[in-house]
Amino acid sequence: MEIKKFSIARLWAIMIKESMQIRRDRTTLGLIIGIPLLQLVLFSFAINTDPKHLPTAINDADKSKFSRTIVQAMHNSDYFHFITEVEDERQAKRLLDTGEALFVINIPPNFSRDIVRGQRPNILLEVDGTDPGAPGQALGVFTQLMHNVIDSDLEGALQHLHARPPAFETLVHTLYNPLRITQFNIIPGLLGVILTLTLVISTAQAVTREREIGTMENLLASPARPLEVMLGKMMPYVVIGYIQVILILMIAFWIFSVPIGGNLGILLLACLPFIIANLLVGLTLSTVASNQLQATQATVFFFLPSILLSGFMFPFYGMPVWAQWVGDLLPLTHFLRIVRGIILKSNGFVEIWPSVWPILIFIVVILVIGLKRYRQTLD
């Protein structure tokens, strides 16, 4: 058999042919080049491991010059952003339970009187410990600030109070995860991450697979409407999603000793809209992609923002405001608050509702888009 010599001309011809095919397939070209560049810019600006302007509430029962100095010093540090003043412990606990505040600074009554008398009163900083990485730097700054924060106010007859120890003591009370065990934060978050990855990939190839194996004609010929087809493809994966949820919760409890403080029934019910949202995303992506490769690529580009902008890997409040807006559009962001709230904070339905309704709105929007795209695909 004659062995043909290697030909630069033939190689060049094949390269030109392949380049023309890539240029014609604009969807794949955009997925390969355009979206990674967009994500590079997005994530470079958004990801921040030193979160500042963390939401803080104040419970000031003293309302004195000293307490105002403490609050102003915390504000000037840029690590604390005071969002509201609470009247009692019940209101403060609600803010911490819902995640609206990461810190609550409690200044007791007669705080200034006790300082003047040299009795070294306490102030209490309550911390949401569900994400141990978020308040880390802020706590260090808070401790340093409190050493000499009111020294400028100790003048005249009070100047002797400059002596160490400081004129007051600070207590830090970490709630929900007092030992700051990483697994207590990561494993509930992994529940959402695993569901997002597996469910979106599972349904992302649904329509493209029908087209590639030649069974799309059967769907075209059937009397099934687009909504019926989408729901029919989605429902079996709902069962699979719940199997994953149960297995992950069992592993979390039995192997990693993650305490499930809340109602398990509420947790399972709250998983349903999140599962449906991810399945609809996969189905919608499958109507946009022309083949299974594109569907898989699109899944990756949805998954990366979800994992990086949701607060799973990096503190959510460390991102700039515009990046938090983007993160709030993603179901995983709200599901992380739901699952961590139920497992670690023992939240009930009232506390998780502010994170449930955004997922329901997302379902409606993505369903409308998916139905519209699906009709176009069938046509």
Image (cartoon, rainbow, N blue to C red):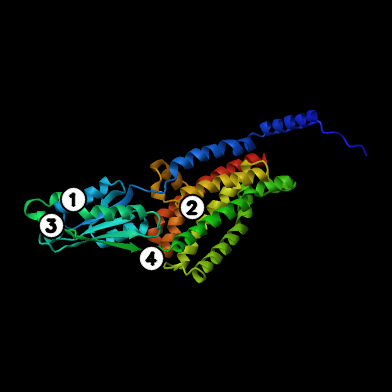
Marked residue nearer the N-terminal end (4 or 1): 1
**Residue 68: mark in rendering:** 1
Marked residue nearer the N-terminal end (3 or 2): 3
Q: Is residue 25 visible?
A: yes
Identify the residue under disc 4.
Answer: 179
Identify the residue under disc 3.
Answer: 161
Q: Give residue 75's position: percent from left, percent from top.
A: 26, 47
CA gap between label 3 and label 2 equals: 51 Å
For the residue labelled by badge 1, is the local secondary structure a helix, a strand or a loop? helix
CA gap between label 4 and label 3 equals: 34 Å
Marked residue nearer the N-terminal end (4 or 3): 3
Q: Residues within 10 Å of mark 4 (few under 14, many from 20)?
A: few
For the residue labelled by badge 4, is the local secondary structure a helix, a strand or a loop? loop
Label pair 1/3, CB-CB below 8 angstroms: no
For the residue labelled by badge 2, is the local secondary structure a helix, a strand or a loop? helix
Q: Give residue 70's position: percent from left, percent from top.
A: 21, 52
Q: Quadrant of residue 118?
A: bottom left
Identify the residue under disc 2.
Answer: 332
CA gap between label 2 and label 4 equals: 25 Å
Identify the residue at image location x=60%, y=61%: 240
Horizontal side of 19 relative to 241 (left or right) equals right
